Amino acid sequence: MIEALARNLKHSFEVSELGDIHYYLGMEVEKDREGDYFLSQQKYIREVIVSSGLADAKDSKTPLDPGYIKNESEGTPLPSNAEYQKLIGKVLYVAVNTRPDISTAVSILSRKTNHPTHEDWNELKRVVRYLKGTINYRLRLSRKGEVGAITGYSDADWAENRDDRKSHSGFVFQVNGGTVSWACRKQSCVSLSTAEAEFIALAEAAQEALWLKLLLQELNDEQRVVIYEDNQSCLKIIEREKLTRKMKHIATKFHFTKDLIEKQEIECIYCPSEDMVADLLTKPLQRIRLEKLVKLIGLSITV
């Protein structure tokens, strides 16, 4: 298919063959002898570190202090939000392309772009100091994983936001063992229970799964979709014929997800919490837990 596309392009445009890709939109691309690809942004991260004045700063072991959320609404306002917004944009570019391990921190800190405090600024610089200490991390796209499967992980942190008590969703998707998609975001409505927050996160993951499946179908690559969920109560919601009166406000998400399951577009399976990769995308984690999930998501160190 790729060769046919290349031939068609040559008929209409002047095309130069440059061989294997090594650099693309600020991302370094490496390939090993076994055919695995590695994505990183080491050059870009170095530029961010220097421009932030943190070249000589001490490395941080985690991107965000787990206790930061408790005091998120407190602090002395910065005189201007310009530098804060500029740095948020820089680390966001890293988070969405090659570094899912900083996505939660960037998502949470992005909520303060209009009225950041000195405490927010210190935590944002902590993200950069974490990148400084992990600059050699590369995202691995392996050929050794389960062929023919889109594997997803869905999780939520219930009532995480202390201001409005909205929960935080996170999901990760891997194709043939390589992480290709991830996201974390604040939910749009207030959930009344952990199971409800988990189900809303699952519905968001199901939307991404459907898009991935359709994309791969366009490439003539049929894939089964499995989404792992670590909340038993959430899985029981899916088994119901209809929602209870107390959960009617999420009826649309319920019917959307249930319809995909009944049509065998996706399959939802229980996963122990200790192996829930998407936990990385719902809340700040302690170092040991963070390092375990970083490996599971496919980030490795350049030797």
Image (cartoon, rainbow, N blue to C red):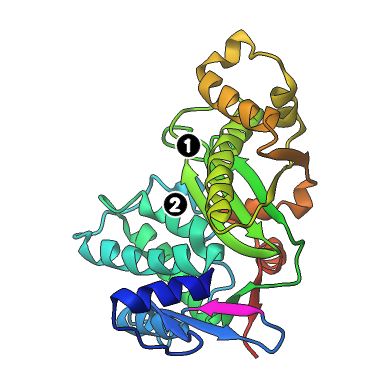
> Which region shows up in magenta?
36-40
Amino acid type indicated by mark 2: Ile
Q: Which residue is mark 2?
A: 108
The residue at the point 68 percent across, 73 percent down is 142
| Nearest the eye: 260 or 8 | 8
The residue at the point 56 percent across, 27 percent down is 256
Answer above or below: position of 95 versus 256: below
Nearer the N terminus, badge 2 or badge 1? 2
Secondary structure beneath label 1: loop
Q: Position of residue 36 (x, y in %)?
A: 66, 79
Give residue 113's mark: none
138 part of magenta stretch: no
Q: Most prominent secondary structure in the magenta stretch?
A: strand
Q: Position of residue 173 (x, y in %)?
A: 62, 54
Answer above or below: position of 251 versus 245: below
* Gap in angstroms between the C-alphas marked 2 and 1: 12 Å
Task: Please give left or right for residue 198 compared with residue 183 in the image.
Answer: right
Residue furthest top as drawn = 245
- Tell me the crowding category of disc 2: few under 14, some 14 to 19, or many 20 or more residues within 10 angstroms, Cα based: many
In the picture, the quarter occupied by the N terminus is bottom right
Q: Is residue 283 visible?
A: no
Nearer the camera: disc 2 or disc 1: 1
Q: Is residue 277 visible?
A: yes
Give residue 187's mark: 1
- Tell me the crowding category of disc 1: few under 14, some 14 to 19, or many 20 or more residues within 10 angstroms, Cα based: many
The residue at the point 34 percent across, 69 percent down is 90
Image quadrant of residue 234?
Answer: top right
Q: Position of residue 223 (x, y in %)?
A: 68, 52
Q: Position of residue 9 (x, y in %)?
A: 36, 74
Amino acid type indicated by mark 1: Gln
